[in-house]
Image (cartoon, grey):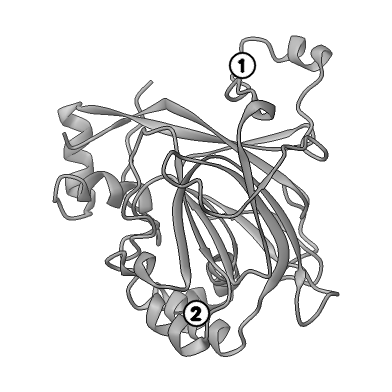
Amino acid sequence: MPLGVVPAGTGNGMAKSLLDAVGEPCTVYNAVLSIIRGHKRSLDVATLLQGETKFFSVLMLCWGLIADVDIESEKYRWMGSARIDFYALQRIIDLRQYDGRISFVPAPGSETYGEPTSYSKHGVRGPSQEELVKIRGHYRGPDTNLENMEWRTIHGPFVSVWLHNVAWGGEDTMAAPQAKFSDGYMDLIVIKDCPRLALLSLLTTLNNGGHVNSPYVLYFKVKAFILEPGTRTNDPTKEGIIDSDGEVLARGKGTYKCEQRTMMTYDKIQITVDQGLATLFSPA
């Protein structure tokens, strides 16, 4: 069943990606007209797995600076979209870094990033055979043999880890300029050691994707991904926030509204991609 996307929020990354691909402005009128015309395109869907819990993502996953700004800036919603820029400046001045590790299966051409490692299922177990019987007929995620893939790893500390499915994360944020709707990969944007002034300059180029050219940014495509989030480097009693498609997936201890229940815990999460699983109405 094709899905129609109409921009009606503060992000609108998917609508912007669809309309920008054909050079049209991101407006409600253009989005509705696209649905009426009935053109379609395929879209990759990512499966996020932790224990017996699954979450399906079509836009992005982030941890670190981007997630903190996206979620913690909600306390300034009265400012409108300016809350993002305002809080991003606060977070750069009082910059956080997070310990942790990311592991990934790189796309062809990206095999030089990170160090070789092996796949470990610990902490990301899927449904048992009995559970599979109960949910037969429902989509369970891609049937991928991860053990036989060539995995690589990067250790923290990290300023930001951002995994993206389409080019735009918001109407003025071209997060992943090389992202495709259905290439079977997700684009990974990693920031580790970065001086504050360089980081501020870097974030001012998000509107045109220029940040991926920074020497402080690693940018490449992955087929599968594992996030192992850790604590803040300057305060091990506090952790971070994991954000998927603009919603909180997990809140660590000491974070904004950490008392609220979330779908997943602040722990190891595995992401795999199912190429072209979804269908969207598209301008062309």
* In this rendering, position of residue 165 left or right of residue 75: left
The amino acid pointed to by label 2 is: Ala
**Label 1 element class:** loop
Q: CA distance from mark 2 to mark 1?
A: 40 Å
Identify the residue at horizontal 53%, vertical 67% (top origin). Answer: 66
Quadrant placement of the N terminus? top left
Residue under numbered circle 1: 138
**Front-most of residues 13 and 119:** 119
* Coordinates of residue 197 in the picture (x, y in percent): 46, 89
* Coordinates of residue 24 in the picture (x, y in percent): 14, 50
Location of residue 5 (image quadrant)? top left
Identify the residue at horizontal 48%, vertical 77% (top origin). Answer: 78
Quadrant placement of the C terminus? top left
**Front-most of residues 220 and 164:** 220
Which label is found at residue 230?
none
Location of residue 159 (image quadrant)? bottom right
Which label is found at residue 88?
2
